Structure formats: C-alpha cells, structure tokens
Image (spheres, rainbow, N blue to C red):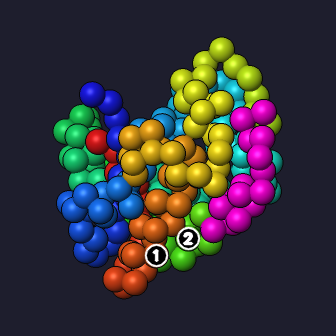
C-alpha cells in the first residue's frame, strides 16, 4: 500500500465511483509523490523546476495541500497540551479553509497554463536535475507529455495526470463547485 492523492470540492458532488470517472479524474501515485517531494528532498523539487522551466506560478496548486481535513484537526486537538493550543489549532484550520475559498478558477487557470506550455516541450526529463533520489522515475513519468500512457491512475505520466486534473476541475465547475483541495489517504 502507499499514499494516494485525491481531489475534493466544497459541494462533494462528483461521482468518482464509476470506472469511467475514476479513470478520467484520478491522479496517480506518482503525482502524489511529486507533491510530497518538498518534504523529502533538499534540492529544488521537480515540480518547482517545471514551474521555472515554463514560467508558471504553481503556488495555487501547492496551496491546495493546506486545506485541513477533519481527521487531521481531531488528531492535532488530541495531542494539544491545553485549551490555548486547541483554540490555536481551530483558528488556523478555519483560516486555512478561508484562504482557499473560491480557488477553483485559479487552479484551473494554473493547470491550463501548465498544459499549454508543457505540450510544446519534448525533452522535459532532460531539463530536470539528475539526482540519486529519483523515486518518480523522471525519464518515464515526465516523458511523452501529450500521450496518455496509463489507465487513468496506474502508469499515468505527468501529462495524463494534469489532463485528469483539468477534467476534474471542469466537471467540478460545471457542478457549481468553487473550491478544490487535496486529500491524502
């Protein structure tokens, strides 16, 4: 088993149970690992490198990680030492939620910019820093950006993950959602 990343919206009205939707909207475990790299490496992450290569601000995507889920809040509260810490946890959680309200259009714009610019780069893996800690298999995951290599989750490449992300956002917007964030599990 491993850690997965899922997209969540304020109205929670997108059916991910069907095979069609799951394959159309899911992000791969490699994308999850890509998002988690900033906690694991002491060099510029691949996502940050890509942001610079194509000159796209990816902070709206990173911000999606800050939305606190109820389980994390409860766990933090359980480990708090006093009422002041509990109050601080609750205030920070509410502020993090407020900071993301209405972010869907900005995230969609960012994803569109990434797709628009990356579709013209044929050698993305060659442009990334070579390291001894290549757990993403950069030469595979970042290759063939314009080709869907996976089944919607298994074996997706970066291009397919971004297109799935975009499909989810378009569906979410059509269903009147305004806020989107990541859930790990």
- Write the residue at 60% across / 63% down: 111
The quarter holding residue 120 reads bottom right
**Magenta part of the chain:** 112-126
First reached walking from the N terminus: tag 1 or tag 2: 2
Within 10 Å of disc 2 (Cα), the crowding (few <14, some 14-19, many 20+) is many
Q: Is residue 152 left or right of residue 123?
A: left
**Relative to 33, residue 144 above or below:** below
Find disc 2 in the rendering and name its residue: 108
- Write the residue at 63% across / 68% down: 112
Q: Measuring from the top left, give residue 132's x and y in whole percent.
A: 65, 14
Q: Is residue 24 left or right of residue 82?
A: right
Q: Measuring from the top left, give residue 11's x and y in whole percent.
A: 28, 75
Q: Which mark is residue 55?
A: none
- Residue 103 makes an appearance in the image: no
Q: Quadrant of the N terminus?
A: top left
Residue nearer the viewer, 18 or 50: 18
Does dot 1 land on a helix, a strand or a loop? helix
Q: Which mark is residue 170?
A: 1
Distance of label 1 from label 2 (alpha carbons): 8 Å
In the rendered structure, does residue 152 fall within the stretch colored magenta? Answer: no
The quarter holding residue 115 reads bottom right
Q: Measuring from the top left, give residue 101's x and y in whole percent.
A: 44, 73
């Amino acid at each position: 088993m491993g850690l997965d990343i899922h997209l969540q919206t304020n109205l929670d009205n997108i059916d991910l149970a069907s095979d069609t939707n799951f394959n159309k909207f899911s992000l791969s475990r490699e994308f999850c690992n890509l998002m988690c790299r900033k906690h694991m490496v002491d060099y510029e992450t691949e996502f940050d490198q890509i942001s610079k290569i194509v000159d796209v601000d990816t902070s709206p995507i990173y911000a999606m990680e800050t939305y606190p889920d109820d389980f994390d809040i409860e766990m933090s509260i359980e480990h708090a030492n006093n009422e002041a810490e509990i109050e601080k946890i609750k205030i920070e959680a509410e502020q993090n939620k407020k900071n993301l309200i209405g972010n869907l259009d900005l995230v969609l714009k960012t994803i569109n910019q990434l797709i628009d610019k990356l579709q013209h780069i044929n050698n993305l893996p060659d442009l990334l820093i070579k390291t001894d800690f290549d757990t993403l298999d950069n030469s595979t995951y970042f290759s063939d950006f314009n080709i869907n290599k996976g089944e919607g989750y298994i074996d997706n490449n970066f291009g397919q993950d971004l297109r799935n992300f975009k499909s989810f956002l378009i569906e979410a917007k059509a269903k009147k959602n305004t806020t989107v964030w990541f859930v790990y599990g």
